[in-house]
Image: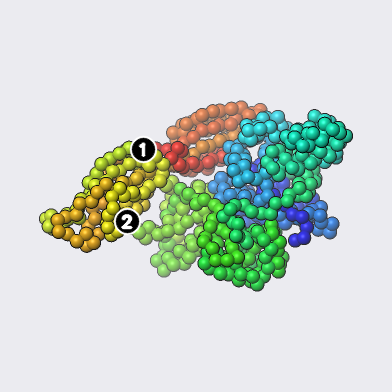
């Protein structure tokens, strides 16, 4: 790679202009002859059929760009363009691991959205610096001040506006007013002291303060312009070059990766190379070397530098470089590859997949082929899971949202061209234990009480969270403990009616075996006793729950009344309706996620495609809906 490099991750809410900005950057640096357009399906980063058809990004895309151009390159930029829709948030979470900082776009016309706040929170939690770009400033009604005020709320401190109304950026020219430069160095006592000694050093010290403050997380600079018109893009690229020279850290995202050689962040089926694993090198790496994933050793047989659909072969790479290989395919995003045999470690939390759909082939002879296609889909998209229902034999496809499952089915049909049937999309339901303490006795008898399990005395308690488990307050034979634990786990997984049970702790107080019995021979009876007892008790002391959704709808005034009426029919709680720009209203509300199934299509028809829906599904102990 040899050039200084920078890995910006591009984050934003839906339709803020991420892909348009990347197209303009590719054009300005000579990578493409003309910027592609999303509505025409000609962009470099959105090339999947589903992306072209729907006009949205559904996967993260790497773009390697030499700046200012390939002939006179001074900097290598490895952009990671991320989906804006929350259904594909797992892609953004994975790319966050390999991004040096977040380039967060804000639609200055529509303002900050709930997802903007979530992006900021995720970046700050990960310790990543943030550079903001106020986009669409060419639109009448774009509001810089409101965006800055909202950003201050999101950050808990004032962002630093770097550009003037005419688009110029004083810090890049080294010429400006004292009021424009002082905020860039006032946070640092040493730079402030140097300025007091010699006021003529202000432009130089301000630039030092900007770079140092950005990488330390003390400053949050804001640029602006229009990605579509190319306004502000030159200034953005110039600032990135300055920031790159101030970056000194090697990529070490977590203590978990201290012995790692690479971090996986994406799986892909490339149109020419086939199945690929994308990763960031944490240390120099070359073809022929071995890497470990857990106890499994792999030989690196090939390396590719990927830029959207384009690729070039490589024999070696430097730390920080984003690469891909076909040499090993088992690791998933977030996994760490090591030089030596090491325990498996992931930097990403498990993805909760709360939306489900059932599938079965029309012909039994196609069952194995459909199952293989589903497994391939689950390999490609880590936010998809597939399993087989034990009672019906149907395949269950689980995902993170309604749109996510719709697109997953569309992708499935590309690889499995035969007919199959599907159920409607459903939202996962759970049983939550709500009783504080319930004393119980488990006992099972058979053959007219001639055989007995003995009696297990226990307390059933709320865990005050979604966690569940068994605790023993008495020493019991291992066979008895295993039977009790196995029975508990089995019931918690499916409850009585098929819903997973959450929030229950079972404390075993005692076990009294039948007189003269050999305890080791009672395992199956003990398990039956606990299973039967729990299934009888749980429905009486639990409530049915599911995910809760927070939604924002931006709509023209004309459709407000109809939309509010439709929401009322779905038992949606309206929190606030605000006039955000002339002729447009922002609805903020919440509802049980299952009540919103199909609403995006209803909104599209009702508002003639002019309503913008942002929906975030929440599910934890403090954020869920009770279902009736």
Q: x%, y% of residue 68?
A: 81, 52
Which residue is pictured at 22% across the width and 62% down the height?
521
Identify the image's colour scheme: rainbow, by chain, secondary structure or one colour.
rainbow
The residue identified by callout 2 is 486
Q: Is 314 situated above or below 62?
A: below
Q: Residue 262: which disc?
A: none
Between residue 562 and residue 96, name the one nearer to us: 96
Cα separation between marks 1 and 2:
30 Å
Which residue is pictured at 82% across the width and 35% down the height?
194
Give the foreground label among 1 and 2.
2
Question: Image quarter for residue 613?
Answer: top right
468 left or right of 50 in image:
left
The residue identified by callout 1 is 628
Q: Residues within 10 Å of mark 1 (few under 14, many from 20)?
A: few
Question: Image quarter for residue 542?
Answer: top left
Q: x%, y% of residue 352?
A: 48, 49
Q: x%, y% of residue 516?
A: 14, 59
Q: Earlier in the sequence, mark 1 or mark 2?
A: 2
320 left or right of 454 in image:
right
Which quadrant is home to the C terminus? top left
Which quadrant is home to the N terminus? bottom right
Q: x%, y% of residue 9?
A: 67, 49
Q: Residues within 10 Å of mark 2 (few under 14, many from 20)?
A: some
Q: Secondary structure at mark 1?
A: loop
Which residue is pictured at 46% across the width and 48% down the height?
354
Q: Is 350 situated above or below 288?
A: above
Residue 369 visible from this viewpoint: yes
Between residue 105 and residue 364, name the one nearer to us: 105
Between residue 107 and residue 98, name the one nearer to us: 98
């Amino acid at each position: 790679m040899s050039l200084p490099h920078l890995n910006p991750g591009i984050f934003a809410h839906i339709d803020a202009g991420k892909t348009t900005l990347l197209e303009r950057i590719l054009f300005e640096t000579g990578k493409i002859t003309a910027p592609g357009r999303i509505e025409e399906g000609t962009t470099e980063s959105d090339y999947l059929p589903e992306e072209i058809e729907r006009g949205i990004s559904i996967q993260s895309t790497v773009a390697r760009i030499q700046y200012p151009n390939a002939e006179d390159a001074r900097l290598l930029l490895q952009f990671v363009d991320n989906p804006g829709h929350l259904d594909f948030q797992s892609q953004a979470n994975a790319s966050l691991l390999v991004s040096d900082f977040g380039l967060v776009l804000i639609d200055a016309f529509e303002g900050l959205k709930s997802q903007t706040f979530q992006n900021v929170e995720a970046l700050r939690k990960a310790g990543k610096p943030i550079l903001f770009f106020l986009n669409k400033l060419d639109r009448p009604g774009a509001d810089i001040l409101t965006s800055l005020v909202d950003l201050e709320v999101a950050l808990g401190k004032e962002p630093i506006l770097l550009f003037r109304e005419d688009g110029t950026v004083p810090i890049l020219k080294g010429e400006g007013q004292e009021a424009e430069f002082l905020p860039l160095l006032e946070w640092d006592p040493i730079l402030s002291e140097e300025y007091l000694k010699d006021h003529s050093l202000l432009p130089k010290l301000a630039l030092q303060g900007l770079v140092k403050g950005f990488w330390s997380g003390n400053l949050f600079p804001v640029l602006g312009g229009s990605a579509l018109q190319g306004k502000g893009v030159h200034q953005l690229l110039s600032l990135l070059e300055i920031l790159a020279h101030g970056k000194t850290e090697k990529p070490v995202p977590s203590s978990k990766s201290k012995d790692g050689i690479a971090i996986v962040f994406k799986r892909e089926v490339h149109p020419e190379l086939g199945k690929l694993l994308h990763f960031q090198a944490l240390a120099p790496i070359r073809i022929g070397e071995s890497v470990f994933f857990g106890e499994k050793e792999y030989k690196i047989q090939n390396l590719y530098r990927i830029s959207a659909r384009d690729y070039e072969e490589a024999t070696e790479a430097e730390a920080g470089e984003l690469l891909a290989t076909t040499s090993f395919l088992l690791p998933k995003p977030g996994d760490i590859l090591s030089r030596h045999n090491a325990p498996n470690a992931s930097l990403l939390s498990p993805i909760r997949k709360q939306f489900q759909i059932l599938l079965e082939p029309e012909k039994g002879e196609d069952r194995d082929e459909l199952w293989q296609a589903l497994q391939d889909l689950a390999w490609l998209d880590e936010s998809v899971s597939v399993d087989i229902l034990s009672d019906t034999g149907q395949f269950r496809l689980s995902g993170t949202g309604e749109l996510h499952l719709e697109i997953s089915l569309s992708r499935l049909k590309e690889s499995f061209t035969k007919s199959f049937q599907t159920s409607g999309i459903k939202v996962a339901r759970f049983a939550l234990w709500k009783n504080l303490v319930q004393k119980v006795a488990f006992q099972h008898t058979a053959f007219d009480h001639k055989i007995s399990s003995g009696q297990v005395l226990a307390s059933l308690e709320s865990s005050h969270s979604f966690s569940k488990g068994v605790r023993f307050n008495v020493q019991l034979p291992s066979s008895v403990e295993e039977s009790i634990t196995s029975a508990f786990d089995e019931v918690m997984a499916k409850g009585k009616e098929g819903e997973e049970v959450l929030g229950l702790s079972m404390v075993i107080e005692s076990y009294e075996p039948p007189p003269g019995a050999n305890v080791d021979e009672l395992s199956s009876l003990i398990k039956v006793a606990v299973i039967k007892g729990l299934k009888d008790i749980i429905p009486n002391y639990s409530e049915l729950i599911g995910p809760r959704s927070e939604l924002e709808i931006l709509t023209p005034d004309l459709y407000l009344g109809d939309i509010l009426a439709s929401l009322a029919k779905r038992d949606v709680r309206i929190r606030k309706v605000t006039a955000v720009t002339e002729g447009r209203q922002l609805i903020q509300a919440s509802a049980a996620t299952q009540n919103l199934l199909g609403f995006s299509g209803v909104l599209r028809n009702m508002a003639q495609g002019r309503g913008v829906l942002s929906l975030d599904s929440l599910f934890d102990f403090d954020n869920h809906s009770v279902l009736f």
